[in-house]
Amino acid sequence: MAADTTAKRRRATSADFVKAAEGSPKTSAKARGSKTVAEAETAKAQPVVSVTRSQTPRKSEAESVSEEAAAPIILPTIYNKHGRLIVPPPLKGSHEILVRQNVVADQDGLDRIQDDNDLVRMREQHLLVALPVSRALTVDDRLPVNRRYSRPWTAQFLETLARAHYARFHTSIQVNSAVRTVEFQQRLIRTNGNAAPAEGETASPHLTGQAVDIAKHGLSRTEIAWMRGYFLPLIQQGRIDVEEEFQQSCFHISVYRKYVPSGRAPRHEIAGGRHRTAALAAAIQ
């Protein structure tokens, strides 16, 4: 009994989280068959999600955030102690979220990009940077080249997400939409009844360059569960807002300036406190 209590109270380390996140479902299933009783008890003590920071801080592409610490890498554990997939509920949008995206953009002093000339100017001033395309992150061929840009912190978010997803699944994620102009949004409204307004308190956050759409089409149920688990802590921290769209099947994500910390953070940080872990577990169940 004493041994069981000690095992359950053992504080999980970052190595535990990385092992839980990076192991493939097939590998995990095989490993579960050969675990000792002590290992099984230890696994029960692991929280739902961990937050770690990369060992080597990476510099952002834009001068304004060139000295910032690397963004956190969220490693969700998507299987429970019985080996069953944990699928968090969809991250549904709301009027409140639409308003908040614009309020935060105004607080951060973000301008709405009016037209293509405005788009060129902001790129030249490094207020917008190219999407971090790699083997882990692709862009929909239909997205015009001049709109494959975003705010620097949004690009950092994409790079970190894509890298973590690729390490786990060895497949890429795809960006369907990024920065838009007011001029383009006005045209889009005429053909797409689901499009957000070009102005007002619920205007599309794509107009500020902080928002991107990531395709859900082609993602497995396991990948979607992993993505939702990845997003949840960042939503709770107020760093991003996510709305799942089903008609166009994508994750619409607004990344806020605070996503990139204002100073260098400790190299390791684990999501602490029983309350945060309990809140996330409740959201996932």
Image: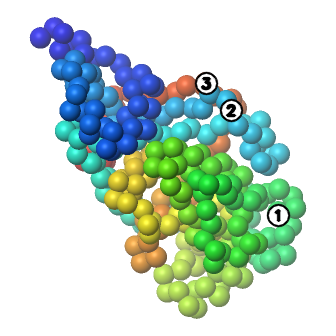
Q: Position of residue 173 (x, y in %)?
A: 53, 59
Q: Secondary structure at mark 2?
A: loop
Q: Position of residue 213 (x, y in %)?
A: 55, 66
Camera-side residue: 261 or 132?
132
Quarter of the N terminus within the rendering: top left
Q: Secondary structure at mark 1?
A: helix
For residue 271, side relative to residue 119 (left or right): left
Q: Is residue 25 above or below residue 191?
A: above
Q: Which mark is residue 266?
A: 3
Query: For the residue marked with disc 2, what is the amino acid?
Result: Pro
The residue at 61%/24% (across/down) is 266
Query: For the residue marked with disc 1, what is the amino acid?
Result: Met
The residue at 42%/22% (across/down) is 13
Q: Residues within 10 Å of mark 3 (few under 14, many from 20)?
A: few
Q: Position of residue 283 (x, y in %)?
A: 31, 47
Query: For the residue marked with disc 3, what is the amino acid?
Result: Pro
Q: Which quadrant holds residue 20?
A: top left
Residue occupying the far left of the picture:
1
Check whether the beta carbons of the residues at disc 2 and disc 1 lie within 8 A of each other: no
Q: Is residue 183 above or below residue 100?
A: below
Q: Position of residue 171 (x, y in %)?
A: 50, 55
Q: Which mark is residue 57?
A: 2
The residue at 45%/25% (across/down) is 14
The residue at 67%/57% (across/down) is 133
Sooner in the amino-acid sequence: mark 2 or mark 1 = 2
Check whether the beta carbons of the residues at disc 1 and disc 3 lie within 8 A of each other: no
Residue bearing the label numbered 1: 122
